[in-house]
Image (cartoon, grey):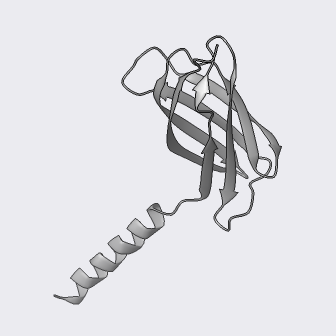
């Protein structure tokens, strides 16, 4: 293998490593069940790459039910302190959802996904 090929491989590895770094750790907390026509709290804790709480970010999430096309549930998340952000969602159906999370923090924009499941609250 010549020196040029080795240089190309090293550059590709550096690019792959840089692109795969994750700027934030998101911990999503959702209730196991919901009550129709009532708001359900969705909470997330956002940490930076050093594990410190992210404070003062603009955070939003779009919830989409997997395999269905009845529209997204959009939420602007409100900061409650210590890197915790909370939003309210009104679910119509139980099932598997994907939360597309957008974070804008100190000019840095990030988009990621988390998945969760929720069922109808049968205690009503």
Q: Quadrant of residue 73?
A: top right
At 63% from the left and 65% from the top, the residue drawn is: 49
Q: Is residue 43 above or below residue 40?
A: below
**Where residue 100 appears, x then y in whole percent?**
53, 36
Of residues 45 and 104, the one drawn nearer to the viewer in this rendering? 45
The structure residue drawn at horizontal position 30% and vertical position 82%, both measured from the top left corner, is 7
Comparing 68 with 108, the one in front is: 68
Q: Is residue 60 left or right of residue 80?
A: left
Q: Residue furthest top?
A: 37
Q: Is residue 92 above or below residue 21?
A: above
Residue at 68 percent of width and 65 percent of height: 51
Quarter of the rendering containing residue 25: bottom right
Q: In the image, is residue 48 above or below residue 116?
A: below
Residue 79, given in percent of the width and then of the height, sits at: 79, 41
Relative depth, front residue between 11 and 19: 19
Looking at the rendered image, the quarter that the C terminus falls into is top right
Percent coordinates x, y for residue 103 in the rendering: 64, 44
Residue furthest right in the image: 81
The mark tally for this picture is: 0
Specify the quadrant of the image occupied by residue 47. Answer: bottom right
Q: Looking at the picture, does residue 43 appear above or below residue 90?
A: below
Q: Quadrant of the N terminus?
A: bottom left
**Residue 119 image position (x, y, % from top left):** 52, 25
Determine the residue located farthest toward the front in the rendered image.
Answer: 123
Point 50% across, 42% down: residue: 113
Q: Name the foreground residue: 63 vs 92.
A: 92
């Amino acid at each position: 293998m010549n020196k040029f090929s080795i240089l190309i491989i090293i550059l590709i590895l550096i690019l792959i490593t840089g692109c795969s770094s994750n700027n934030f750790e998101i911990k999503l907390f959702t209730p196991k069940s919901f009550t129709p026509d009532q708001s359900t709290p969705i909470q997330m804790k956002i940490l930076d790459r050093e594990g410190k709480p992210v404070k003062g970010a603009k955070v939003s999430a779009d919830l989409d039910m997997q395999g269905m096309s009845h529209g997204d549930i959009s939420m602007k998340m409100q900061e409650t302190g210590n890197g915790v952000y909370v939003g309210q969602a009104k679910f119509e159906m139980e099932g598997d959802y994907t939360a597309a999370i957008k974070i804008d923090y100190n000019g840095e924009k990030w988009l990621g996904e988390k998945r969760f499941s929720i069922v109808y609250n049968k205690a009503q």
